[in-house]
Amino acid sequence: MKSSWYESKEKAIAFRKRGHSLGAIQKRYGVPRSTLAGWLINVKLSAAQKRRLFENRMRALTKNRHKAAAWHRARKTASLREAEEAARKVLGNINTNDHDVLDIILAVLYLGEGFKNTVGTGLGNSDPLIVRTFLAVLRKNYRLETSHIRCELYLRADHDTEKVKHFWARELRLPMRNFRSVQVDARTRGSKTYAGYHGVCAIRCGNPTIQRKLLFLSRMCFEKIVREHAGS
């Protein structure tokens, strides 16, 4: 009994001899690839035909990669949008004017970024938003005065010291006189600093009482959460 595709065999062979790919032949005649492989096993392609098929495959791969990359970018964009909306919803339920809420936020921030092995309250970071948050809560909850704030900069060798000072003074809304110390890392000589990096700004306010309270608060907060939600 002849296959239902048998009448296409000669056409498929002729098409292959003209240098077309198995995929193109399958699409044209609707014959399964396994059947085509048997029909075309003895058809020899010229070097030029093989080269053209290879180039076509490479173009198709490049096109598919671009499509896949675009799909992944779109998916990531949608995912980021969803995450941002979810974060906004949570933030909408939090009263950031509440003294205790701000203290907990400050305590968690301090546990991660604050100075713990020195006497006195302080924090250092390269992100102005982190340092500004630290200052904002200290000013609101602890009435920290500008005159009690000491700023230290830790820079790379190719930084323009005065330029970076002005950057941090502008970002933190502090007068230049508060920036009392600049240390340059000699190990960075000869290497270029990436754009947008303004070193690390360390803020100290000298009050060890705040430091101790924040460290106790962060630990006690975590212990309370574990007791209530981790079954211990």
Image (cartoon, rainbow, N blue to C red):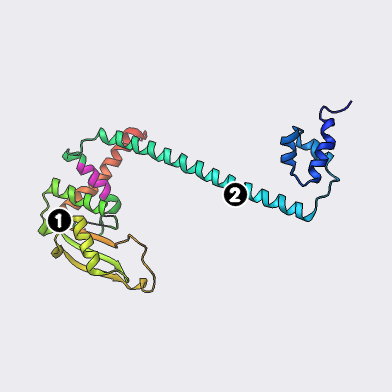
Give the labeled residue for mark 2: 62
Q: Please state which amino acid type lies under the numbered disc 2.
A: Thr
For badge 1, the amino acid type reads: Asn
Q: Quadrant of residue 22?
A: top right
**Residue 166 position in % (x across, y down):** 20, 63
**Spot occupied by residue 194 in the image (x, y as percentages of width and height):** 37, 63
* Residue displayed at 30% across by 33% down: 89
Q: Which mark is residue 207?
A: 1
Viewer-proximal residue, 161 or 73? 73
Q: Is residue 105 magenta?
A: yes
Q: Position of residue 208 (x, y in %)?
A: 17, 55
Q: Quadrant of the N terminus?
A: top right
Q: Position of residue 75 (x, y in %)?
A: 47, 39
User: Is there any visible trace of residue 182 in the rendered image?
Assistant: no
Dot 2 or dot 1, earlier in sequence: 2
Q: CA distance from mark 2 to mark 1?
A: 61 Å
Relative depth, front residue between 172 and 2: 2
Magenta residues span 102-109
| Side (left or right) of 8 relative to 199 | right
Q: Residues within 10 Å of mark 2 (few under 14, many from 20)?
A: few
